[in-house]
Image (tube, rainbow, N blue to C red):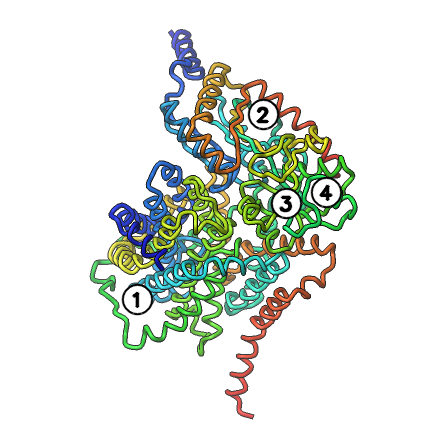
Amino acid sequence: MEFYTNALTSVLAWGPLGAMIGATLLGVLIGALPGLNPVMAIALLLPLTYSMDPLIALGMVAGIYNGSMYGGAIPAILLRIPGTPASIATTFDGFPMADRGEASKALKIACWSSAIGGIASAIALMTMGPLLARLTLFFGPAEYFWIAIFGMASVGVMVGSDPVKGIMAAVLGLLIGTMGIDNLSGQARFTFGQTWLLGGLDLVVVLVGLYALPPVLQLAEKRDLVGLSSGQLKLKSAPFEKGEIRGLIPTWLRSSGIGILVGILPGAGGNIAAFLSYNAARNASDDPASFGKGNPQGVAAAECGNNADNAASMIPALSLGIPGNVVAALVLSALTIHGLQPGPQLFHQNPILVGGFMMEMLITSVLIFALGGMVATRVFAQFQRLPGVLLVPSILILMCVGVYVINGRMVDLWVMLAAGLAGYFLEKVNVPLAPVILGMILGPMAEQSVRRALLISRGDATELLTRPLSAALAVMTLLVILWPIAKSLQRRRKAKPV
Amino acid sequence: MTIKATFTGFAAALALATPALADYPERTIELTIPAGAGGGTDTSARKLALLLEEKLGTSIAVLNVSGGGGSVGASQFMQAAPDGYSLFATWNSPLTTVPQVQDVAYSLDSFTPIASTSETAYTLCVKADFPATTGEEFLAELDANPGKYTYGNDGIGGTMQLAAERIFQAKGIEAVAIPFGGAGETLQNFLGGHVDIYGGSISTVLPYVESGEAKCPLVTSAADVPALEGASGLAALGLADKETLLWRAILGPKGMDPAIVAKLADTIEEAVNDPSYVEFLATKGEVPNVVKGDALGARLHSEFDALAEVSKGLGL
């Protein structure tokens, strides 16, 4: 405990506090702009930290990271454009809510859920870090394979009303995911002799095109030249009704748990956490059919899940020296620059700095309550009032800038455009887009893991099932597939008394 | 009149194309890194860029272009103008290793070598209960059990794998290579017991050697490494000529002005030997190593040839 009280006093100085407030606001903004992502902002920031008070620098990292995870929800709700890959699941119910005039309620739920997920995750980091870190070591290639399959099984929820179209979308994502250099053989696949394709298609480039362009084109189709007057935009405060918070608590608990578990596994990310949380909330619901049509539980599950991934993803980085994602890798390199050696001894080397950073992850999550609500509803939601004739070109320019700065090459803009047109036509024929992205993320993970597992077992496939943990994960996968079927059978039986 | 105008225009263009060395650099330099943000190459390059900004008196914009084990960034960079305002901060693998396994658009001649900056050895480590401790015992154990042990490495045909295979080939050893996404991922699988041997950078595994959970019998440099007391350098095992290192360098596109190359090389040498940079390198288990200009080109060519031989032997 002394560990944290000491750290707290250093964090609550003016410098770190100001850095956290500013960075959280900046993070919300970065998350809200499609194409811009926290990784870029933090990478730009870190060299400056070499000569800066590390607690100020790490406070900025924490603020940008947590703020952006929430910021992604703002355009997801208002415009159906996910600001980050992790906020795709937020569009499912967030946008239908906004569409029926409940934008401020959806934003408020997203804000609360993000803050709660972030706080739960930070507490897990502070109390159980080293313990959870050891847990991740049990996950070898065979287990990672099952996690990817488990994630894909949850696509079942995302496929919408027509399963065949949903599966087609997932297969498209899997195919795109195979492009580029194969990490296990060194062979180039589907690169057509183009060197820029060696790294495969960039997830963010495809995401921005696929998800941001169709809504923009739809806005353009409306030919809105006037926009809304201030009276038409219902942004007056949307207080929680009695019992509403209590109804969300089970979802928050469940999603926090899922987010933390996904977070501690190196390689899995906020997008998977959000999808799995959303899926779990839908499975647990009495009325799964209301999901995707503006159910507040869907927004809460997705936003809580993706923020709960954040602090937890620092656990293997800080306790083992194994960065699970790029932000964790950047934080690790910042710590090494200040003379710390990540690994089991890190907590003893400089408790003020390590404990301070954990505190900062907690404080910036709390800040989302205050700053997130204020910024989102007072400022960002006003963009909804802009006429389409202004909104469409502004979003397009932001998209292009965001995509160009990722790799600094023009060809990415063409990829974005192609993905956008594909997304537009897929939506016209009612093919859901979420399975495409999920296939792109999980396909390579499943393929590489299973091949590694088989290399290690010298080609013996039974080892995928005979290890205790992999067997348990396989059973869970089976359950997640059978659960909705069993539930709907049960409902049918109830409806038709024998 | 027209001829005169054309001529002055031409002269002006010429003056623009070859700026006087005295004026260099007069605008922002773009530094391409063929790896993602946060990795070893990225952090060393960004830290060095800060020092170079100060010494050159200009700003440096960093661009990460990852993918293909560095070949995507290298291919994109080779098309840059050789005017000194586009530089490439890389580790050796995209130049000397990747072309052995990938059909890349560039060759060593697509670049102007400027200066190398730092280097470090790779290491092979095992759990504390492994039945071998010294380098000699370790190689004997592997030799006695062909195909029994798995070792994690940084990727198929990567420098780490070739570094290990050079040693194994010389001793007729057969071990199963399991490629991972990087040293962190290898460490996770090594600590979890999913692979028997850790193969990768020293700094990543060092905390576990200090805690006694792991021991490292071998490093891939000829000389011993002070940070890893128990590890044998290759010279001690009679394999000095099988040394393979991880090293970093800054290059330009083909055809740079030699005067600008010389100025950059000297500035880089100064920056690398700056005490703050040496200290920074030490935290990552690296040491400064500056080889400039043509000598760097020779080093690249000889490493390329040696690794070509190994990968041919591996059938890659």
Have a look at marks 3 and 4 and say if they share a chain. yes
C-alpha distance separating marks 3 and 4? 13 Å
Task: Name the residue tied to disc 1.
Answer: A105
Have a look at marks 1 and 4 and say if they share a chain. no
Which part of the image, by quadrant, shows the C terminus of chain B?
A: top right
At x 49%, y 64%, the residue is A276
Task: Name the residue tied to disc 3.
Answer: B125
Can residue A153 be seen here? The reply is: yes
At x 50%, y 27%, the residue is B80
Mark 3 or 4, nearer chain start:
3
The reply to whether dot 2 and dot 3 touch (C-beta < 8 Å) is no
Can residue A221 be seen here? The reply is: no
C-alpha distance separating marks 1 and 2? 58 Å
C-alpha distance separating marks 2 and 3? 37 Å
Q: Nearer the viewer, residue A265 or A156?
A: A265
Task: Name the residue tied to disc 4.
Answer: B137
Task: Name the residue tied to disc 2.
Answer: B110
Local secondary structure at mark 1: helix
User: Which residue is the extreme one toward the left?
Assistant: A231
